[in-house]
Amino acid sequence: MLASLSYAIGGFITKHRASRVSPFALATWMTLASSVLLLPAAALGAPTETPGIGPVAAVAALGVVGTGVAYAIFYSLVASVGPARTFIVTYLAPAFAVLYGATLLSEAVTIATLAGLALIVGGSYLAAEGRLPGRRRAP
């Protein structure tokens, strides 16, 4: 609960306190600070042998693209559309999890799963638009 609350509050703090800072600078400093904080744990779990170039390149690509660029996009969205609308994208993750599970792992998709996804997508739409379909937006 505390992690979820902190995640939500962090977006609003970012919007109000760091709105004048470049999203790329925010992503860089956030990633750098996280790396420094995780360094002791990484040192304790260091491999006994030097990894090959393939694993090192994979970790570097995930770090730069999967984290760095993703956070730069995230902070750009917070600055342009606000934190409330930015966080709506996190509600779409279950839909992709069901899609990947069904296509890649042959998991069953039940009526309950589809009903849950409909509720998630419907709630996300209402949160983003703030109105029911067919109704005019308030002036």
Image (tube, rainbow, N blue to C red):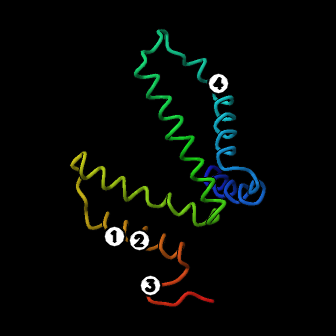
Q: Relative to residue 36, is residue 52 depicted above or below? A: above
Please state which amino acid type lies under the numbered disc 4: Leu
What amino acid type should be assigned to the residue bearing mark 1? Ala
Disc 1 packing (10 Å; few <14; some 14–19; many ≥20)? few
Horizontally, residue 59 falls left or right of residue 39, namely: left
Tag 1 residue? 115
> Is label 4 in a helix, a strand or a loop?
helix
Q: Nearer the viewer, residue 105 or 1?
A: 105
Residue 133 shows which numbered tag? 3
Determine the residue positioned at 63% across, 63% down: 80
Describe residue 8's horizontal placement relative to residue 137 as left or right.
Answer: right
Q: Name which residue type carries label 3.
A: Pro
Q: Nearer the viewer, mark 1 or mark 3?
A: 3
Q: Please tell me which residue is depicted at 25% across the width and 53% down the height of the picture.
A: 102
Q: Crowding near pointer 3: few (<14 within 10 Å), some, many (20+)?
A: few
Mark 4 / mark 3, whichever is N-terminal: 4
Q: Earlier in the sequence, mark 4 or mark 1?
A: 4
Contact check, label 4 and label 1, Cβ < 8 Å: no
Mark closer to the chain start, 2 or 4? 4
According to the picture, the residue beneath numbered tag 4 turns out to be: 39
Give me the C-alpha separation between circle 3 and circle 2: 14 Å
Quarter residue 29 falls in:
top right
Ranked by sequence position, the earlier of labels 3 and 2 is 2
Q: Secondary structure at mark 3?
A: loop
Residue with the mark numbered 2? 119
Would you say the residues marked 1 and 2 are in contact, meaning their CB atoms lie under 8 Å apart? Answer: yes
Query: Is residue 35 shown above or below 92?
Result: above
